[in-house]
Image (cartoon, grey):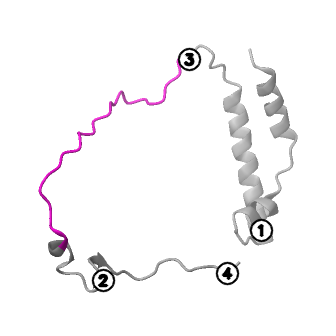
Amino acid sequence: MYSLQTDWALNYNKAMKINVPHIAKLANLPLSSAEENSLHKQLEATLDHINELNKINTSEIKETNEVNNLFNICREDEVKPSLSQNQALMNAKHTHNGFFIVPYILEEVAT
């Protein structure tokens, strides 16, 4: 019914220790001890739920990548008249050589 890989994954998830401080460090999340304990309980509950779902035999279920029977409804690209460059830049506060000038949103980080 289950593949060896699935059985191993089920047993492994039950026995593994979740290293919440390491996960928090990878995610750059400063957590208090209370938050670590809370997150550990939540992650265990999530893994338990996944284990329960993994027990369901889905071998007879047809695979699908969507459930709404939607089709690609995008239209073909059409070239239409648009604003000229001068018209597009007409109300801009700052321009340079035919381009918009906008404030920086990212900072350069020294390595």
Earlier-in-chain disc, 3 versus 4 = 3
User: Residue at the location (72% across, 46% down)?
Assistant: 45
Please rate how many residues cluster around mark 3, counting C-alpha atoms within 10 Å: few if below 14, some from 14 to 19, many from 20: few
Residue type, numbered disc 2 = His
* Quadrant in which residue 77 is drawn: top left
Residue under label 4: 110
Q: CA distance from mark 3 to mark 4?
A: 52 Å
User: Residue at the location (71% across, 25% down)?
Assistant: 55
* Quadrant in which residue 97 is drawn: bottom left
Please rate how many residues cluster around mark 1, counting C-alpha atoms within 10 Å: few if below 14, some from 14 to 19, many from 20: few
Q: CA distance from mark 2 to mark 4?
A: 28 Å
Q: Secondary structure at mark 1?
A: helix
Q: Which mark is residue 96?
A: 2
Question: Which residue occupies the extreme front position in the image?
Answer: 97
Q: Which mark is residue 34?
A: 1
- Start and end of the magenta stretch? 61-85
